[in-house]
Amino acid sequence: MHFKGFPKASLSLMVIIFCLMFVSCNCEQNNIESTNTFFPNIWSEKQIFAFSALDGQTNYNEPFTTVLLGSHVGIRLQNSGYINENLPIERLNEKHPLWFGFETEGQYYDEIPGKGINSFDEISSRIIASSIIHTVIRKKDIDIEIKLVFADRNTIAGSVLVNNQSNKDVILHINNTSDSTCKIFNNSIVLEKENYKTVLSFEEYFLFENYKAKVSIREREQKIINFSYRIEYGTQTVDYTPYNFDSLFTKRLEPYILNSLKGNQNEKIKRTYLKAYSVLRANTESAIGRIKTMWTTPDRIPHRKMWLWDSGFHAMGIKYFDKEWAKNAIKAVLEYQMDDGFIPHIMEPDKHSNITQPPILAWSVWDVYQTIKDKVFLEYSLPRLKKFLDWIEKNRDKNNNGLFEWYNGDESGMDNSPRFDSDKVFDAIDFSCFVVNDYNYIEKIATEIGDREAASLYKSKKKILIRNINEILWDSARSFYYDKYFDGTFSDVKAVSSFLPLFAGVADKQKADIIISELKAVDLWWTHQPLPSVSLKDETFGSNMWRGPVWINYSYFNYISLLNYGYRDMALELLNKNIEAITKWYYQEGTIFEFFDPLNIKSPKLLPRKKTFGAIYEFGWSSSLYIRMVNELIEQQKL
């Protein structure tokens, strides 16, 4: 995003002025809003707070991933596994918590309003983002203003301003742990666990008691406390390193000002838009091992790794902010390709899975190209895209009928869909349509760079596959596309995957009109937040992951489908419904989820996920496609 109508010099001056307005430790709420930027500002549990490769070098093998606490103003380490908020104290200590509180008149306060008897009166956050936090907690006439930023991949720099306007003395508590294994060295609190340790260090020497720092502030006094909180994988403990905190804070704030949504959208959408941007920043890592460029992950916790189709979706939202970032999200995956053309669905620096994922990379490459207009990127991508589809043709058509079969549900991306309940192999409507779509975009890429032979070949492949899908996977008795088992029978599961023939341009206008007439039915698909992953009336419909909830990538596929066949008003309604739902749940839960309740009633954190509970927080493609949908809506409204 950019400011229109301003020369670059004026833009730089504006950014500097805006940021300087924000720097003062004693700034008021209206100062941050005077930048005309509506920052994400919802404090809630499990939000990711981690260093981004966009700000400097990260290290996948030595992570420092923290999440926000839900009941206290603070963070805790979460380098692996599913995030469990309500941990017993002994487990919480293992997570290296850091939180803030204070005592006055013999009373102690450290809980977020409504969370307990030691609650603050108010928490007022100015920005809660992936590597910058600015929030104020209040009780009576005492304000505690807390700022946290990532200085580098190992270090969080912090600054706390205590503004004591009361007639009583106040003691600030900066809590690190209640673990008796904690050690105190000079001005640092050190907690060692497993193969690393965390070190909380202060600029000044303070009283340490019960593994927490205590700082006295006299009545009617203001005091600033600067500190650092870092992780160390080595054996040496380093003393506190001072930072120019205001400068660092301004630097971390700048990307949010520069990339804020301009125009007349409402405040809630603007805040959610920057929240989505924040999620994408947090989920970006540096090159390491076999991953040769900066890359993206679905979520820093628990997925952590690089995933094939997620990366393609990420690039399609990232392109609105940074061309190289978008290209690298795709190139990281293409660079990982095996000699035979295979691309794994999960990739790590030194190992990978043995299955693939839906082929959407040619579509993603072409889409990013529409913004960056870099033919070198197309020339780089084309041979790799062709090689990947060659591998699919050789390895995913067991019955040699020109259609494609998934190895299992995980490979399809629809992990636990009821489509896979029977364990029978079938010609997959979604796989075959994804290949048609990528054939189409390889043809476009080849044409753009002047490779007529490749363009002609993939145009022919596309035509043949479209014919096969319509002849084999269209059930004329039920007027719908279905998966088909090798014994010649159709699947009975009516899943959202069956709408992909519209996305890929497989269906003729007559078939499309029949399918879209069903799509409009509020008791089947056109729910409060369209489209459920399984029809509401299908006997397998439920609330577990791909067995009913809405996934934003499939909603976006269907937005494209509706545009393809001339249903523009319905397409815009679909965008609006999804934007409204994602915005709603960000404001209620403080995050952007992996999947959603089609009725838009239950919080996604209450929906089951396979054998666990709750949709993943801080999810990459939901964030990326939210950004995409908002921008699409803006462009469509100009037409």
Image: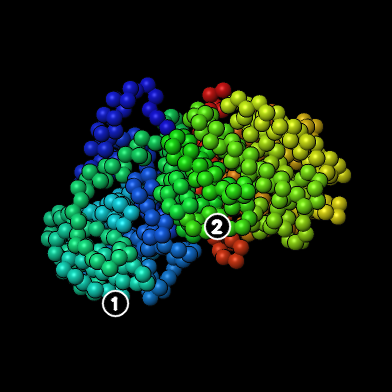
Q: Is residue 18 visible?
A: yes
Name which residue lies at 46% across and 47% down. Answer: 292
- Secondary structure at badge 2 equals loop
Mark 2 Cα shell of 10 Å, populated few (<14), some (14-19), many (≥20): some
The residue wearing badge 1 is 181
What is the quadrant of residue 235 in the picture?
bottom left
- Secondary structure at badge 1 equals loop
Compare marks 1 and 2 and give the one earlier in the sequence: 1
Name which residue lies at 25% across and 46% down. Answer: 248
Are circles 1 and 2 on residues that touch, CB within 8 Å?
no
610 versus 268 height, above or below: below
**Amino acid of disc 1:** Thr
What is the quadrant of residue 479 in the picture?
top right
Mark 1 Cα shell of 10 Å, populated few (<14), some (14-19), many (≥20): few
In the displayed structure image, the side of residue 508 where residue 383 appears, left or right = left
CA separation in Å, label 1 and label 2: 37 Å
**Amino acid of disc 2:** His
Q: Position of residue 137 (x, y in %)?
A: 29, 55
Name which residue lies at 62% across and 52% down. Answer: 356
Q: Is residue 627 visible?
A: no
Q: Position of residue 67 (x, y in %)?
A: 39, 59
Q: Position of residue 191 (x, y in %)?
A: 29, 70
Q: How many marks?
A: 2
Disc sitting over residue 352 in the figure:
2
User: Which of these two is toward me, 12 or 549?
Assistant: 12
User: Which of these two is toward me, 126 or 87?
Assistant: 87
Q: Position of residue 26 (x, y in %)?
A: 20, 46
